[in-house]
Amino acid sequence: MYWVAVVDDDMTNLKMAGTILSRQNMRVTALKSGQSLLKYLETNLPDLILLDIRMPEMDGFETMRILKTRPVVSDIPVIFLTADDHQASETTGLSLGAMDFIKKPFVPEVLVLRVQHTIELVRLQRSLSNEVKKKTKEVEGLSIHVVQTLAEAIDAKDAYTNGHSGRVARYAREIGRKLGYPEERLTEIFMMGLLHDVGKIGIPDAIINKPGRLTDEEYAQIRNHPELGDRILKRIKEMPKLSVGARWHHERYDGKGYPDGLKGKEILEEARIIAVADAYDAMTSKRSYRDILPPERVRQEIENGKGTQFDPVLADIMLQIMEEHPEDLLKDD
């Protein structure tokens, strides 16, 4: 059961949020001020805090600043509640460490989904972080197995991409081997490849598996998965580069990719490697909107993408791997 603390000086908002979340079997604690929240957190640890910005005496931002100075509760995720669309408010809130914003009046479905996804993302972050801490000396053994299991769980959200993350990881590792990466770095890029799509855990299954054309709003949600993945992985301090593939695997060599529009060598090499590996697997896998592309078409698409979508050197290496392993490229290790 999820436990949510809702903080708002407006009793109507408290009741509405409580009703919406309680109907989803969530435990809800209603608090009317920042001071009451800080007092409450001295003896309670909810999974998430919904915090109104505009409150008398102590507003949401000041409450958040104090919250972040208290080690025991500083990691509790916070979503700000706001009735305005001021960009400055969002900038301030995000800089203070907020996970998200929800506009008032509440849209019940949006409120529930954002609360559920945020709690799930934070639990995943903590699980990964704890596993890495426990197994730092066994990165090449149990930790990789754990990450592979997680990657399989992510792939399972998409009925058409079973095994996708594992294949991308293997292609990326083989490209790295061709570049002369040492074993330690090969292990690192393998793990980056396994987790490059981890942000999809925050995308509704109905959108991921939709057989027809996505709406603009649905496509915008899909495009958000690199940033979600980055937010999940960058908190694993023991492996600071783990989030590289997640955030930048949809950047393009010509600068027309997303989320940051990086160009050429501005994109870290590991991300450029995962980008071509990811594209190869997408073309050689059945998707909801098309069948597997024939090998010649795949080769032509990679050739055409050199210097635009892909790093030309890495695209050539991918083509070389295709020539060397025409039959067994997709086989597991």
Image (spheres, rainbow, N blue to C red):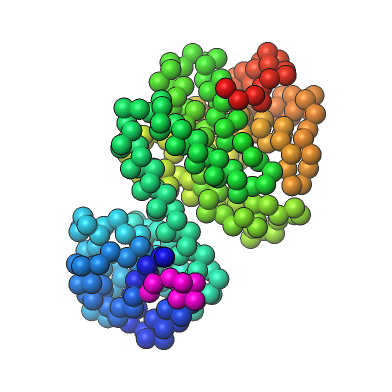
In percent of width and height, residue 309 lies at 64, 33
Q: Position of residue 224 (x, y in %)?
A: 55, 51
Quadrant location of residue 256? top right
Quadrant where the C terminus is found in the figure: top right
Q: Residue at x 72, y 19 (%)?
A: 327
Above or below, comparing residue 267 to residue 66 in the picture: above
- Whether residue 27 appears in magenta in the rendering, the answer is yes
How many tags in the picture? 0
Is 303 left, or right, of 156 in this rendering? right
In the displayed structure, would residue 95 be above or below residue 317? below
Q: Residue at x 66, y 26 (%)?
A: 330
| Quarter of the view holding residue 312 | top right
Residue at x 45%, y 24% (from the top left corner): 187
Say if residue 249 shows up in the picture.
yes
Split into 4 quadrants, where in the image is the N terminus? bottom left
Position of 56 with respect to 1 (left or right) is: left
- Residue 152: image location, x then y, percent: 55, 40
Q: Answer with left or right where residue 172 lies relative to residue 284.
A: left
- From this viewpoint, is residue 84 visible? no
Does the stretch in magenta take in 184? no
The reply, left or right, for residue 137 in relation to residue 99 is left
- Frontmost residue, 175 versus 292: 292
Observer-nearest of 256 and 245: 245
**Residue at the far bottom in the pictured view:** 12
- What residue is at 57 percent from the left and 54 percent from the top? 203
Q: Which residues are magenta?
A: 21-28
From this view, report whether residue 272 is shown above or below residue 91. above
- State the image coordinates of residue 29 (x, y, percent, origin top left): 34, 75
